[in-house]
Amino acid sequence: MRILALLRGIGLALCLALVALPAAAQDARPLPDEIVTRFLADSFGDTEAAIGAVAASGAPQAADMLQALGDRRLFISASAKGLFYRDGAGKGFDARTGQPADVPADASAVRLNNRLRGVVQAALGTLTLLSPDPVQRLRAAESVFKSRDPAALPAIEQALARETNARIRNVFEEARAAIIIADTKAPEASRMAAASRIAETGDQDGLALLRQLSAQATGNLKSVIESSIQTIERRQQIRQAGQTVWFGISLGSVLLLAAIGLAITFGVMGVINMAHGEMVMIGAYVTFMTQEVFRARFPHLLDWSLPIAIPLAFIITGLVGVLIERGVIRFLYGRPLETLLATFGVSLILQQAVRSWFGPTNREVSAPSYMSGSFEFIGLQITYGRLWIVVFTLVVFFALLLLLKATPLGLQMRAVTQNRRMAASMGIRTRFVDAMTFGLGSGIAGIAGVALSQIDNVSPNLGQNYIIDSFMVVVFGGVGNLWGTLISAFTLGIANKLLEPFAGAVLGKIIILVLLILFIQKRPRGLFALKGRAVEQ
């Protein structure tokens, strides 16, 4: 029985193959001689007619031919009385049959002008409107929108009737509207409806099309077009404001990462740590070294270098922070000016050490594949890299909150923050808490360096670009208050980006600084001051 079933299956496969042979032969039909003759005539009029005939021929090589024509890879040969083209790799083909062939030595490229280039693009768009590949259909619809060729309208109508993808269908409708509104022979009511449809899109291409047609339109059509232009401009202003807010949120997440460790250190110990920026710099260099090791030894796992660099940067910068606290800062508690000068000296030492080791030039850390590219969300262009940094910042923030609220070390840190002497009298080792707090703040700064390596060049001066902003965030939000630091970082980030279009980057920062100084005059302890006595020795 099994043998009989196998034989039946083989027989069925043979029958299907025989049935498919005529269809395959039909798909491989050559181009009509008339098309080749028109191309051989080498006149712009004949070439335009030939392009339309190629698009309507249904030959499988039609798309490759038209693409080759647009790239000046389609050739005519008087001696061979034939038409040939080369693919992107330089391989020759006979355009009549689509079979591989050598391009004759006397062959010359088919001449094109700007009008014919537009005709080629429109023909290519029409050819791929019904492609099974959604990416090709989308590109074809965009090409038809730009060319606005009336000959493509039937193909657009046919594609609209079959399209099920909402996004591609929307682009098809836009292309259809663009063809109708640009056709002066179309009824005025249809052109007015097309203008309203283009206004729903609100993109720059639609705005440019409407502005171009506004000068030629009259009467009711002109009123509708101008109203559509105003609608698009309003939507673009809203989108621009939303894009600016997103950039501000992105900048705020960077400021929060850089400042959150400083908020802990300053809040618990009252130490003005001018070497905090160098912890950020060390974290970025740890990321660079980790990626170099992966690139040399495990290139197939390069995307994993960034996740592995996060704990490494935290541990290494945390240990450096503990060494600084034990070696320098613990002798200077209660002497803020001396602490500031000492940590400033430490920052210079660390910068020079890194400069001597890695050199003064910038180092680049490549982004992993999952942080590359961008996407559109409600009209906003959002890069995956920035989005990952925002998410990562919030994860670090809430993990730190959990550590402070739900662990013995966090309880001791909060006790020392509120009343150091009382905490010491209850048996809490305040010196140990100081060291661990400084190490924790430095470790978080190292994690910030990992994130900053994705948006900034890794250099010995990396930390100096963020140290002043970090202090501004901490002071504005309230010393030692994490929620205040969060709100402060995003507020300053958004305010900075909102001011940049009007005042510029430098003047915008100056305005923010002046406003912050005026605010501190009214609220010296920031937005959210901690309850309890200040840190004292």
Image (cartoon, grey):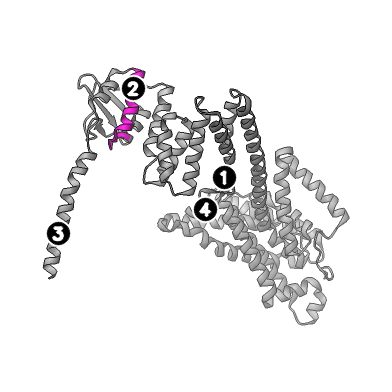
Which secondary structure, mark 3? Answer: helix
Q: Which residue is mark 4?
A: 371
Give the x, y percent position of residue 490: 70, 54
Q: Is residue 395 left or right of residue 416?
A: left
Instruction: Give the label on residue 361, or none.
Output: 1
Which of 466 and 367 lies nearest the eye of the viewer?
367
Which secondary structure, mark 1? Answer: loop
Which secondary structure, mark 2? Answer: helix
**What amino acid does circle 4 point to?**
Met
Sequence-first tag of 3 and 2: 3
Q: Are marks 1 and 3 in contact (CB under 8 Å)?
A: no
Q: Are marks 3 and 2 in contact (CB under 8 Å)?
A: no
Position of 323 relative to 12 (above/below): below
Give the x, y percent position of residue 199: 59, 38
Which range of residues does the magenta coloring cover?
Answer: 43-62
Q: Is residue 48 magenta?
A: yes
Marks 4 and 3, how far apart at CA? 49 Å
